[in-house]
Image (cartoon, helix red, strand yellow):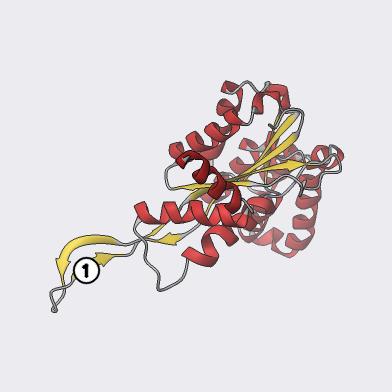
């Protein structure tokens, strides 16, 4: 049970090259296939101690599926079974992908988590990347000030003063192009998820390291090889098994299977 615990949920996507037969054959008569890259979606559920560190006495839970809705449904099943509605606090850490933010809070509230217990956090390093993108598009008159402006912007981000970044951009870009407008809009849309000073004070995460690490270990190191092409229906099962293994739940799974057989 997650009752009374501080929970952090990381959500992101990885990369896997798939095998899709195209109905054609080569000169030898062998079936040929296309190999598009696809993005499997992944979550990790962890428990935070009061000092903000991950509680290593509680095993993580990994989940990986290709569909957005399918992944969220799987996450919801885990959380419902673990009594997430009784958790002390629930932090969601992710990048700026709208498919995550459009679903996560609604799902948690449906499972009984009170709105005031939900903390949405945008990964700081994704936010800082947008600072670099804005600096790359500075007008000529400001290009020499790029380093100073970048430091100022990042200081404002850490302080949770996103409004200052937006105001400064409006001052610098009198006629912003579509890209700059999109970058500034990124800060405006995610302002409530970028209160890093508050997160630090409350001993919460400011980055998505737990899910980035999970994607690297579960997906990328095994299923992102240049010469490996996977059928989607097969690789989802392999994601599950690898996630079980790397979360030290293999014996638990085998015991469960034996128990079910009995």
Q: Quadrant of the N terminus?
A: top right
Please indicate, yes or no, whether residue 102 appears anywhere in the rendered image: no
Residue found at x 55% / y 28%? 107
Q: Which residue is mark 1?
A: 32
Residue found at x 43% / y 47%? 66
Q: Residue furthest front?
A: 262
In the shown orientation, is residue 206 left or right of residue 106? right
- Nearer to us in this view, 43 or 178: 43
In the depicted structure, whether residue 237 falls above or below residue 120: below
x, y percentage for residue 232?
A: 36, 54
Please indicate, yes or no, whether residue 61 appears anywhere in the rendered image: yes
SS for tag 1?
strand
Quarter where residue 165 is shown = top right
x, y percentage for residue 68?
A: 45, 40
Quarter where residue 75 is shown = top right
- Nearer to us in this view, 187 or 76: 76
x, y percentage for residue 226?
A: 43, 72
Quarter where residue 29 is shown = bottom left
- Rate crowding at label 1 as few (under 14), some (14 to 19) or many (20 or more) other CA atoms within 10 Å: some
Residue found at x 77% / y 41%? 48
In the shown orientation, is residue 124 left or right of residue 221? right
In the shown orientation, is residue 204 left or right of residue 189? right
Residue found at x 81% / y 41%? 49
Q: Residue furthest bottom?
A: 28
- Number of disc labels: 1
x, y percentage for residue 191?
A: 69, 36
């Amino acid at each position: 049970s997650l009752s009374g615990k501080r929970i952090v949920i990381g959500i992101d996507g990885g990369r896997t090259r798939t095998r899709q037969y195209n109905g054609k054959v080569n000169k030898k008569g062998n079936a040929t296939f296309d190999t598009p890259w696809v993005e499997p979606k992944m979550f990790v559920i962890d428990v935070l101690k009061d000092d903000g560190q991950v509680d290593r006495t509680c095993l993580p839970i990994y989940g990986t599926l290709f569909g957005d809705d399918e992944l969220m449904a799987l996450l919801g099943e885990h959380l419902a079974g673990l009594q997430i509605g009784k958790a002390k606090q629930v932090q969601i850490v992710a990048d700026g992908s709208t498919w995550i933010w459009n679903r996560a809070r609604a799902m948690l509230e449906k499972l009984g988590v009170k709105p005031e217990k939900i903390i949405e956090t945008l990964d700081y390093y994704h936010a800082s990347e947008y600072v670099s993108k804005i600096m790359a598009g500075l007008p000529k008159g400001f290009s020499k000030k790029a380093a100073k402006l970048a430091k100022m912007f990042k200081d404002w981000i850490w302080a949770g003063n996103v409004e200052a970044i937006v105001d400064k951009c409006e001052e610098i870009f009198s006629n912003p192009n579509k890209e700059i407008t999109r970058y500034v809009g990124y800060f405006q849309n995610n302002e409530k998820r970028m209160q890093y000073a508050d997160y630090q004070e409350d001993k919460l995460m400011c980055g998505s390291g737990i899910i980035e690490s999970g994607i690297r270990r579960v997906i990328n190191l095994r299923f992102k090889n240049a010469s490996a092409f996977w059928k989607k229906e097969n690789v989802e099962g392999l994601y599950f098994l690898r996630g079980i293994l790397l979360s030290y739940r293999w014996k638990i799974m085998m015991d469960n299977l034996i128990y079910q057989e009995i």
